[in-house]
Amino acid sequence: MSEEASYKDKKVITIGVVSELTGLTERQIRYYEERKLIFPERADKGNRKYSFNDIERLIEIANKREEGVRTYDIRQEMIKKNKELDQKVRKNMLKGQINSRFGIQKDR
Amino acid sequence: MSEEASYKDKKVITIGVVSELTGLTERQIRYYEERKLIFPERADKGNRKYSFNDIERLIEIANKREEGVRTYDIRQEMIKKNKELDQKVRKNMLKGQINSRFGIQKDR
DNA sequence: CGTGTAAGGAATTCTGACACG
DNA sequence: CGTGTAAGGAATTCTGACACG
């Protein structure tokens, strides 16, 4: 599982290939970065590198744009979802702490 | 499972990134292709595109080369392994046929 | 706001070849 | 055989800007 995720998250794809894969122009892809919807890495010489995850995200973005959703609102949705995720993570961490204290007492 | 495999097999990485990831020079990578050890795809304009699978394969090749194994012999090993795989596939197909005829007779 | 485009430069990639051993 | 390198050209990518609406 963690193995597979490493492929999905590894930033290795150049903008030209991303453009082919998503159907978006390079201009659009760079603009969505400017609007903080995606976060490619940079190679040593400055060229952008994307992950498969970024590509899936761009396809989502393209769909929302077709529906007329503005980049600003797409970003707001993204922030909102991240906050929800944060909540979940915190809950699980708390649960984990509780378990480690009271739940799983192998030795005592 | 088939989802994850699509990332691993998709040819999207340029030779420069492959060089970074494997530590091999572009010259070496192109030479191993000439010796039929790897099979990148070509983009429209002719530049090579590799998959994560190719990268793992290249790392294996690099290790064998360090041990002094010649490209010819690396290729022979590869061919041998593919033949073994073929055998397995044939066996399973045969098994599948048998099952579909005699094994799983839901209705008759 | 979101996207197109022309501009100029820098970095990438390609092929075929010569070199060495 | 396996790899390095210089050569020249073609394609890629980058940035900042002007345009339109």
Image (cartoon, coloured by chain):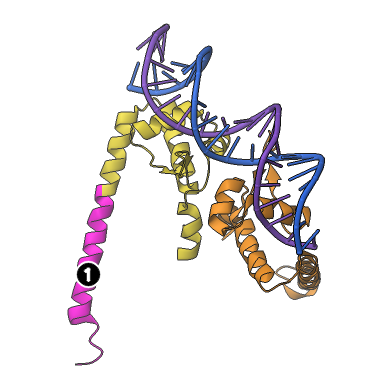
Chain colours: A orange, B yellow, C purple, D blue
Whole-percent x, y for residue A19 in the image: 58, 52
Q: What's the residue at 56%, 58% (across, down)?
A: A23
Q: Is residue A94 left or right of residue A18?
A: right
Q: Position of residue A36 (x, y in %)?
A: 77, 57
Residue A32 in the magenta stretch? The answer is no
Query: Can residue A97 be seen?
Result: no
* Pointer 1 chain: B
Q: Residues within 10 Å of mark 1 (few under 14, many from 20)?
A: few
Q: Answer whether residue B86 is visible to the viewer in this image.
A: yes
Taking depth in this image into account, of A72 and B55 the one nearest to the observer is: A72
Q: Say above or below: B3 vs B44.
A: below
| Count of residue discs | 1
**Above or below for A106 versus B48:** below
Q: Main secondary structure of the magenta part?
A: helix
The C terminus of chain B: image quadrant: bottom left
Q: Amino acid at mark 1?
A: Lys
Instruction: Work out whether A79 lies above or below A11.
Output: below
The segment highlighted magenta reads B83-108
Q: Dot 1 lies on which element?
A: helix
User: Does B96 lie within the magenta span?
Assistant: yes
Identify which residue is drawn at 61% across, 64% down: A59
User: Where is residue B100 shown, x and y percent of the image?
Assistant: 22, 78
User: Farthest residue in the bottom direction?
Assistant: B108
Return the residue at label 1: B95
Residue A9: image quadrant is bottom right
Q: Nearer the viewer, residue B90 or A63?
A: A63
In the rendered view, tell whether residue C20 sits above or below residue A12: above
Q: Name the residue located 22 percent from the left edge and 86 percent from the top edge.
A: B105
Q: Position of residue D18 (x, y in %)?
A: 80, 45
